[in-house]
Image (spheres, helix red, strand yellow):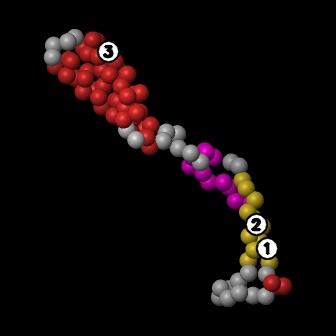
Amino acid sequence: MPSTLVVWPVSGGPTGRPVAVSQSRTVVSREPVASSTGGHDRPFLSLHAAVVLLTALVIGFVVGGLSHLGGMPAPLAVLAGLAAGAAVPVLHGLIR
């Protein structure tokens, strides 16, 4: 696990009152870097991208389900649902 060097001045007494600069000390410690994102500051998907993809997924399920309920064989209904995924560029422009 990577670690980082943390240096900060300690300028207060045990009661939290400030002390003179000549009495201050510097504390150096090595603390592990705890990052749940693996060191990346940005999320994997932006909120906009997640909304667009989830909307396309819901539209695909609805189109595929309605196609199957309308009498279309299951493999063709799946293809119809996948074809609805072509709506992603349109959704990208509509959802802002």
- Tell me which corner region of the image, top left, top right, bottom left or bottom right, holds residue 66: top left
Binning the other alpha carbons within 10 Å of mark 2 as few (below 14), some (14 to 19) or many (20 upward) gives few
Q: Separation of disc 1 and disc 2 at Cα? A: 7 Å
Binning the other alpha carbons within 10 Å of mark 3 as few (below 14), some (14 to 19) or many (20 upward) gives some
Three-letter code, disc 1 = Thr
In the image, is residue 15 above or below residue 39? below
Give the residues drawn in magenta, as a range: 30-40
For the residue labelled by badge 3, is the local secondary structure a helix, a strand or a loop? helix
Which mark is in front, 2 or 3? 3
The residue at 29%/29% (across/down) is 59
Give the left or right position of residue 25, taking residue 15 as reference. right
Binning the other alpha carbons within 10 Å of mark 1 as few (below 14), some (14 to 19) or many (20 upward) gives few
Three-letter code, disc 3 = Leu
Q: Separation of disc 2 and disc 3 at Cα? A: 59 Å
Image location of residue 35, percent across then percent down: 60, 51
Three-letter code, disc 2 = Val
Q: Nearer the viewer, residue 33 or 93?
A: 93
Q: Main secondary structure of the magenta part?
A: loop
Name the residue tied to disc 1. Answer: 26
Of the residues under marks 1 and 2, which one precedes in the sequence?
2
Q: Separation of disc 3 and disc 1 at Cα? A: 66 Å
The residue at 32%/15% (across/down) is 79
- Tell me which corner region of the image, top left, top right, bottom left or bottom right, holds residue 16: bottom right
Residue 39 lies within the magenta run? yes
Name the residue tied to disc 3. Answer: 79
Q: Nearer the viewer, residue 59 or 7?
A: 59
For the residue labelled by badge 2, is the local secondary structure a helix, a strand or a loop? strand
Image location of residue 64, percent across then percent down: 26, 21
Image location of residue 95, percent across then percent down: 37, 38
Name the residue tied to disc 2. Answer: 7
